[in-house]
Image: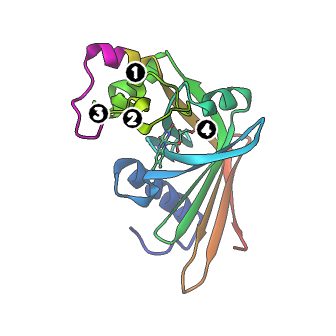
Amino acid sequence: MAAMPDSLDAVWNHAWARLLAGARGRGDPFHQGVLANASEDGPQARYAVLRAVDPDGGRVAFHTDRRSPKLAQLQADPRVAWVFFGHGEQLRLSGTVQLHLDDAEADAAWAATRLLSRRTYAVPLAPGTPVDFPADAGLTGLGAAPPGADAQARARGHFALARLTLDSLDWLSLASEGHRRARFRREGGRWQGTWLSP
Ligand SMILES: Cc1cc2nc3c(=O)[nH]c(=O)nc-3n(C[C@H](O)[C@H](O)[C@H](O)COP(=O)(O)O)c2cc1C
């Protein structure tokens, strides 16, 4: 990774490079971040894996089970914040989520998923359903065989692609040579950046 970025353009490119590396690498700290949204019960936050990054469109994406509580929450209010930390840097993304359930975009995202990841979408119970014992949730161990055709079809019916169109990106670097913070906002279709006091 390049040295500490010295210009707003360099910060912008640096931040997107961090996100691209996060989406690619399972061991990268930016592979997952805390995704926050509003709900009738107050704020909600949980980790989600960064699945796709589109610097030109200012968009990122995650996958989720459409039966999970967050799906209905996002249908009611699609605004989210997604926060990442790694390499001494915090990245705060915020914007609006568009949900893709049964369209071509969701099909393409599903086609790119790993066979073993599909198992989590095939379980009969919605995420968050109370069970008497962990085994009752029906998720087989990590060593289990990949799902067959029936289970995969069922799993596809539970899968959702959530694409976030950013309206703000806030980068904070904590470094011994001096903390730095910059924020970029999409205004009238153009990104405007400014340095901020950390
Ligand atoms: C490292 C990590 C990555 C996760 N990635 C996802 C993800 O990409 N999508 C997702 O729906 N849940 C993911 N989860 C599970 C969520 O954090 C959460 O427990 C689940 O989605 C239920 O959230 P909800 O009740 O707010 O809908 C992940 C959890 C961890 C710990």
Q: Which residue is mark 3?
A: 116
Name the mark on residue 155: 1
Q: Nearer the viewer, mark 3 or mark 4?
A: 3
Helix or strand or loop: what does disc 2 sit on?
helix
* In the image, the residue with mark 4 has its CB under 8 Å from the nearest atom of ligand 1: no
The kind of residue tagged 4 is Thr
Q: Are marks 1 and 2 in contact (CB under 8 Å)?
A: no
Q: Earlier in the sequence, mark 3 or mark 4?
A: 3
Q: Is residue 2 magenta?
A: no
Q: Which residue is mark 4?
A: 165
Residue at point 67% right, 60% down?
Answer: 183
Name the mark on residue 135: 2
How many neighbours does mark 1 have within 10 angstroms: few (below 14), some (14-19), or many (20 or more)?
many
Q: Is residue 152 magenta?
A: yes
Q: Are marks 2 and 4 in contact (CB under 8 Å)?
A: no
Name the quarter where the N terminus is drawn: bottom left
Estimate the spatial distance between the alpha carbons at disc 2 and disc 4, rounded to whole Å. 38 Å
Estimate the spatial distance between the alpha carbons at disc 3 and disc 4, rounded to whole Å. 28 Å
Helix or strand or loop: what does disc 3 sit on?
helix
How many neighbours does mark 2 have within 10 angstroms: few (below 14), some (14-19), or many (20 or more)?
few
Q: Earlier in the sequence, mark 2 or mark 3?
A: 3
Q: Is residue 192 left or right of residue 32?
A: right
Magenta-tinted stretch: 141-153
Quarter where residue 129 is shown: top right
Q: Nearer the viewer, residue 124 or 90?
A: 124
Q: Earlier in the sequence, mark 2 or mark 4?
A: 2
Above or below, comparing residue 93 to residue 123 in the picture: below
Q: Nearer the viewer, mark 1 or mark 4?
A: 1
Tell me where residue 57 appears, x and y as whole percent. 54, 39
The kind of residue tagged 1 is Ala
